[in-house]
Structures are given as structure tokens and as C-alpha cells.
Image (cartoon, rainbow, N blue to C red):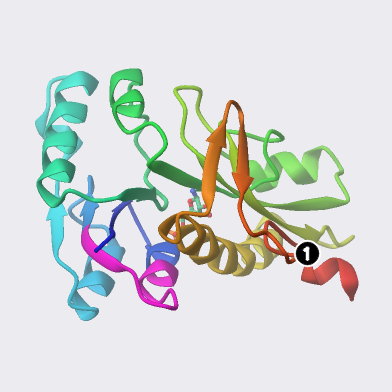
Amino acid sequence: MKSLVILISGRGSNMRALLEVKPPVRVAAVISNNPKAAGLEIAKKYDVETAIVDHREYQNRKAFDAALAKKIDFYRPSLIALAGFMRVLGDGFVNRYKGKLINIHPSLLPAFPGLRAHEQALENGVRIHGCTVHFVTPRMDHGPIIIQAAVRVLPNDTKETLAARVLEQEHLIYPEAVRLYMEGRLKLSGSHVEVSNDTSENLVLCSPELHK
Ligand code: GRF
């Protein structure tokens, strides 16, 4: 049976959304680099195995990446999902899991990669903001796009109000991307992702707010 490993560093709300994906996916483990990540407690409530690979215990990124890869490989997952995982992963690590490592980022990539995505959106006066699930490549917050969701930017938005509306969409598209992957419907074709049997217009673009 196909299985998923989720990597977190903090709150774990996207992880929770993945734990509730329907039909359920076997989550082999939730791994955190941060022993205090709140998401670890949530995972335990769902009876999911948890593990910690604390980056502070390793001399450099390469050593940390190697320890993390060893832990991941122990669970032999079909897919690895970064869900608020706040460590930069080295090229060797990323290439090792090419095509089976995905991430969610709170912007409509390629706009606003990196930290402060919501602030960047507000600073730039965009009318539409959102979130993206993509395959991970060595270039941070880039990589073939699987699914995106868009939200309106409202005149009085603060980074908090905007982040909250985007987060609601994150919780919809991340499980959807995992479901598509597990059903074998995602195919990497260069820098693009082909979705097979894509009969629904909304499958890879979620824009409920735009229709209001
Ligand atoms: C989310 O906004 C995600 O897009 C970004 O980090 C945040 C993590 O939140 N990569 P949570 O831990 O999933 O609640």
C-alpha cells in the first residue's frame, strides 16, 4: 500500500489536513526537526508514528540531510510531503527524492517565494494571492506546479487576515494533491505536471472566492 511521510517544523495544520484526506492515505510517520513542534502532539492524537531529527544535533546541513534521509527511508514512503518544514534541504537530498517530494507554499508561485509571502503580496498590491503545491527541486519554492488556489486580496487585508484565508485553501489543495499522487495521476514532464483523467476544471485550480 502506498504511504506518506510528512515533515513538519511547527503548528502542523497542513499535516492535520493530510491526516484527514479522504479516502485515507497511510501515513507512515510524521517527522519533525523541532522537538517542540505542536504538530507532533496532533499526530500522536491521530495515532500516527512520530520521529524527531533535530537539526541542532548535526554539524552541518549535509549531516542533517543524511540523518533525515535515513529516517525517511526507514519508512519506505511513496511520497514525502513538506508541511511547514522550515529547513532548507540540500541539492543531494532533493535529487534523491526527485518526483516524490512535494511542498506547499503560501503564494501563487513563482510569485513571492521564500519567507514573508503574505507581506510580499500586500507590499506589491496584488489583487489575487493564494497557495501552491509543487514538486520540490533544488531551487527553493520553485518546481513543477501541481495545484493552486486563489483568493481575493481585500482592501483592508492585513498579513494575518490574508494568511488565514489562504490557509483555508491550503487545507483543501494539499490533500487533493496527495490524493492525485496516490492515485498515480500526476506525471512529471520537464518543468510541468500532467494530470491524467483531469475532467474537472477545478481539479488543479481552486478559486472559490473568485466566484463570490
Ligand atoms: C503554511 O502556510 C505553509 O504553506 C507554509 O508554512 C505554513 C505552515 O503551517 N509552508 P502549518 O504548520 O501547516 O499550520
Q: Which of 53 and 187 is in front in this view?
A: 187
Identify the amino acid type marked 1: Ser
Instruction: Indicate yes or no: mark 1 CB to ligand 1 under 8 Å.
Output: no
Q: Quadrant of residue 115?
A: top right
Question: Is 184 on the left-hand or right-hand side of 202?
Answer: left
Write the start and end of the magenta stretch as one range: 16-29
Tell me if residue 176 can be seen.
Answer: yes
> Which residue is pictured at 78% across the width and 64% down the height?
207
Instruction: Look at the picture and state if 189 lies above or below 131.
Output: above
Q: Residues within 10 Å of mark 1 (few under 14, many from 20)?
A: some
Write down the residue under mark 1.
207
> Which residue is pictured at 44% across the width and 78% down the height?
22
> Which residue is pictured at 17% across the width and 53% down the height?
35
Percent coordinates x, y for residue 203 in the rendering: 68, 62
- The total number of labels drawn is 1
Circle 1 SS class: loop
> Which residue is pictured at 82% across the width and 37% down the height?
124
**Split into 4 quadrants, where in the image is the C terminus?**
bottom right
Q: Which of 54 and 194 is in front in this view?
A: 194
Question: Is 167 on the left-hand or right-hand side of 70?
Answer: right
Q: Quadrant of residue 205?
A: bottom right
Question: Is 40 on the left-hand or right-hand side of 178?
Answer: left
Percent coordinates x, y for residue 141 in the rendering: 54, 33
Percent coordinates x, y for residue 75 in the rendering: 14, 51
**Split into 4 quadrants, where in the image is the N terminus?**
bottom left
Instruction: Look at the picture and state if 9 lies above or below 141.
Output: below
Instruction: Look at the picture and state if 193 lies above or below 63.
Output: below
Instruction: Look at the picture and state if 8 lies above or below 70.
Output: below
